[in-house]
Image: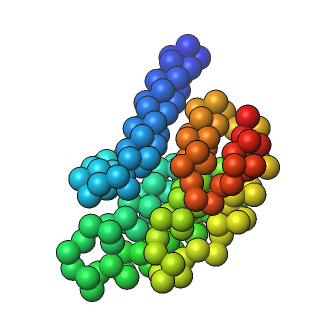
């Protein structure tokens, strides 16, 4: 019985981590084109998991819908809905580095006029201070993001080893 439970748990975690990796990879490419953005949104919407990381990516997908929607009247509601959701998730999970990375990347890529930029410095500092505590996959993801980020300076990037 214990073996069966262990096997089931192992398979669940394997598939969950595969889903997270797919979301990460798609999210990293989402800003490159409208097609990539739509692909990420579709992938996020298909996720059935309700873990906080997946929910964070779904909130980011909602915000990104504003980028590709043709209905200009809905842009504000997409951003507000996604940002509210993301803020609530982070409020309940303040020590989750991946959620902080998602918020940092969203805020960095939104136009300044939107006004959703209040956590850039806090999230960057959190990621730098907690980088060493993360697993290898997340460390690599943070490093890749920081290498192209406007918020991270060369000195900040050097701290991510």
Q: Residue furthest bottom?
A: 73
Of the 4 image quadrants, the one containing the N terminus is: top right
In the visual, does 129 lie left or right of 70? right
Q: How many marks?
A: 0
Whether residue 95 appears in this view of the structure is no
Q: Residue furthest left?
A: 70
Residue 147: percent from left, percent from top: 58, 45
Residue 37: percent from left, percent from top: 31, 55
In the visual, does 142 lie left or right of 71? right
Between 155 and 85, the one lying in front of the other is 155
In the visual, does 28 lie left or right of 99? left
What residue do we see at 46% from left, 70% from top? Answer: 110
Residue 69: percent from left, percent from top: 24, 71
Question: Which quarter of the figure has residue 6?
Answer: top right
Whether residue 26 appears in this view of the structure is yes
Between 108 and 13, the one lying in front of the other is 108
In the visual, does 79 lie left or right of 150? left
Residue 58: percent from left, percent from top: 41, 58
Between 102 and 109, the one lying in front of the other is 109
What residue do we see at 48% from left, 26% from top? Answer: 14
As displayed, is residue 15 above or below residue 73?
A: above
Of the 4 image quadrants, the one containing the C terminus is: top right
């Amino acid at each position: 019985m214990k073996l069966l439970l262990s096997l089931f748990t192992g398979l669940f975690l394997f598939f969950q981590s595969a889903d997270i990796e797919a979301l990460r990879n798609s999210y990293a490419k989402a800003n490159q084109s409208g097609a990539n953005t739509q692909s990420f949104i579709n992938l996020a919407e298909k996720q059935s998991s309700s873990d906080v990381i997946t929910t964070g990516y779904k909130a980011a997908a909602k915000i990104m819908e504003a980028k590709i929607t043709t209905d200009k009247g809905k842009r504000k509601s997409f951003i507000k809905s996604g940002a509210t959701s993301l803020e609530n998730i982070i409020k309940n999970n303040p020590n989750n580095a991946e959620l902080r990375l998602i918020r940092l990347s969203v805020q960095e890529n939104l136009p300044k006029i939107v006004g959703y930029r209040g956590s850039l410095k806090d999230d960057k500092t959190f990621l730098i201070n907690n980088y060493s505590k993360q697993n290898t996959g997340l460390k690599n993801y943070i490093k890749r993001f920081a290498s192209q980020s406007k918020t991270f300076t060369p000195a900040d990037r050097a701290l991510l080893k």
